[in-house]
Image (cartoon, rainbow, N blue to C red):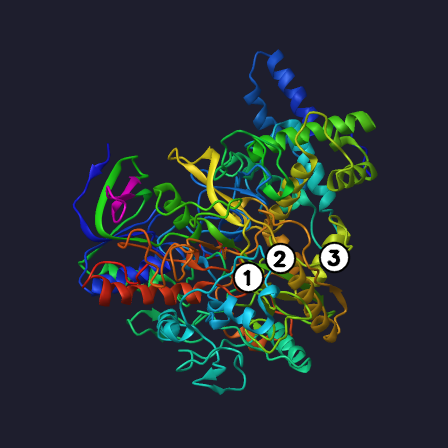
Amino acid sequence: MATKLKEVDVVIVGLGWTGGILAKELTEAGLKVVALERGAPRSSENDYSLPNIRDELRYVVRHDLMQNTARDTITVRNNPKQQALPMRRLGSFLPGEVVGGSGVHWSGHTWRWTDMEFKVRSNYEERYGKKFIPDDMTIQDWGISYAELEPYYDKFEYTAAVSGKAGNIAGQILAGGNPFEAPRKRDYPLPPLTPILASEMFTDAARNAGYHPFPRPSANASQPYTNPDGAKFGGCQYCGYCQRFGCEANAKGSPHMTVIPIAMRNPNFELRTHSWVTRVLKDSDGKRVTGVTYTNVLNGEEFEQPAAIVLLCAYAINNVHLMLLSGIGAPYDPVAQKGVVGRNYCYQTGAGATLFFDGKYFNPFMNAGGSNATIDDFSTNWAFDRAPHDFVGGYNVSGGFNTALPIGYRPVPSGTPQWGSDRKRATSKWYQTAMVINASGSVMANRYNCYDLDPTYRNAFGQPLMRMTFDYQDNEHKMGRHAAGVVNDIAKSMNPTKLNPAAARTDPWTVVPYQSTHNTGGTIMGTNPRDSVVNKYLQSWNCHNLFVVGANVFPHNSSYNPTGPVGALAYWTADAIKNRYVKNPGPLVPA
Amino acid sequence: MKEPGLDRRDFIKGAVVGAAAAGGTATLAAPDIAQAEPAAQAPVAAPQAGYAFLNLDEAAFVEALVDHMVPADEISPKGTDLGVNIYIDRALAGAWGKGERLYMQGPWKPGSPSQGYQLPLTPAQLYRAGIEATNAHCRKAYGKSFDRIEAAQREEVLIGLSTGKIAFDNGPPVRVFWTTLYQTVVEGIYSDPIYGGNRDKAGWAIIGFPGIIAVHRDHVEKYRGKPFPSKPLGISDMS
């Protein structure tokens, strides 16, 4: 029997970026907040310090900061005809499992998604006609606008120490920034990082090709910085251990060194680590939630934590899982196309080339999340006509490195033997003298790509695993071919000694190797309860005191990293709760 | 090449038999073996010798494998001198080898390659079964186990494993075994020396990787387009 605890104002499930932001904002507004985090408490001083943090085997290969799949995982399949099987270890994506969540091990790329995404269906229908969008492509408008989110993007960028160069301040296009970005009220808090050679060469080549390269905006402080909340950042050391690692210099904007410690100092806040939430509880008529049940994984004890407001702030996949396990909202059925929870799961795609330059030293071990250059000419650039290429969405292209450590990154020209002295000679020759150009592409929602509960496999708590059904569609294949063409044209113009060209992927999505921790959808936001799970304030249509925060609310996935809108939406939701909901609890949008 | 004749395994087996005949136990053989190791094989900064997981056949297989895949040449010492065999042994003996973080609940189905690892085996069990199956193949094809065949035959076996031309009777899928084998050899060359491989950071020296150096802030511009003068540092060097 679960021990019933005293009711609190707010219970937060998962303490990463979104949970941390909401914990800080709501405790400052005077609410009593308890956060339940499945992982352990870890700090920069004690856990992410030198020399032990510089361990590729432990953090990259063995996933030290990530979800433990022995305890809970998902099952995967490419289409509803297949039997889903458990993802027995992590691969394609890496949800975090510590205080700070995936915000500890991200590399900091921070983008502002625009009305190109938020009004995706309207935009394409208006320009290209209804028939341009395939019948099984279930994209829809998000019900929110860039103008509404702008102040919250700004807030997140200043909290997380994003370094970059504005391309559009209040409508004025600025040289050196991204000319396709939506207008921002002010520049980034910090100037861009110092470019590495690969980034400079890519920039020159892209510019010569007529594109518009700019430094990739990233939460890697280009110089020491104190954010508006007083959190102190060191300057980025370009150490090359960014993605998958906690930052020893506190230069990477992370919740464990910004919003979470501020919440921790507030007497209104309590953090309980090692607390695994198993269910959200509903009241008898299903109109409100009453709290959550959780297990203390250090001793197996079960608790019920009643709360006036429940915020799901776990990783995107786990938020959807909790909604399905708790029976909140109608589960989605891809065959009948009925129900909403689990709908519009999306991922990302890409294509990459490796360029080998005899005698040119790129020093791939010196980099940071933001030391690359990017072009946005094929993503937010609406002037790029999709009609001749027949795809919806887009991709961005970057040149440079991001965590090019030797177990995982040892480029050799195609055709090099896999072992022996020739392999060693090629590895020795090219590790430092190669660079990469990568395209990262959007994935549009499709009726068959979704989540539901697996009928066979269970987690350590005896609950059904979540089942993911996903594959790329023709739309992504067409885009992939276009992206590979652009990448290869840029690469060839740089005249490398040897080139491993980019190729569009043609095979099904696979659970190995790593691709990106950018899983979106499942509990999507929208304008009405028939085709979405939450409203524009991320409030459940079914239970008005439940908010579901994270990339799980994105109705489709763009080519960009998701953390910018994830952070902005967390601040936006915090404001809606503080300023409106607590004064008058009830639906913030009429259903 | 040297005739693969009497090796340490034969010696150990002989010693065990001898010890047993003399009323001793197998464990008594260990100190003798340490003395019997040819001194030329042992570099100065060798980690603790001896195996925590691999049995004699497996140790012979792994040593032959890593020396074939990573031969001594102008770039680096050979695999066993880099400690790749020690790395593999410790990895298999440790938490990873025993299936830490691996979801191990059935039912077990082969699945499609896109569904990833689906065997009811821990990495250590997979390694054991794969070595046994590879040796069975070698005995069938060449009359000897992998560690005793000629270099050209070893090459043929590795090509067979890596391309899937070899299929194991009743063993694990060759593709899965090879992927694991290959990945662990790479890890043994390039992971931090605290794990037993990359001895003297000679793996990192192959590629000029500077190791765990803390700060490159001033190096980005100073060494842009120029080789970085690398004397690699590992975790032990800074502990």
N-terminal of the pair, mark 3 or mark 2, is 2
Viewer-side label of 3, 2: 2
Q: Nearer the viewer, residue B77 or A104?
A: A104
Residue at 54% of width from left, 36% of height from top? Answer: B97
**Tag 1 and tag 2, C-beta contact below 8 Å:** yes
Quadrant in which residue A208 is drawn: bottom right
Per the rendering, the mark at residue A409 is 2
Majority SS type along the magenta span: strand
Q: Which residue is mark 3?
A: A425
Quick one: label 2, few (<14), some, or many (20+) residues within 10 Å? few
Inter-mark Cα distance, 1 to 2: 9 Å
Viewer-side label of 1, 3: 1
Q: Which residue is mark 1?
A: A403
Residue at 57% of width from left, 42% of height from top? Answer: A80
Per the rendering, the mark at residue A26 is none
- Asked whether A282 falls inside the magenta stretch, the response is yes
Residue B14 horizontal/vertical position (percent): 67, 20
Report the quarter where the N terminus of chain B lies. Answer: top right
Inter-mark Cα distance, 3 to 2: 15 Å
Magenta residues span A281-295
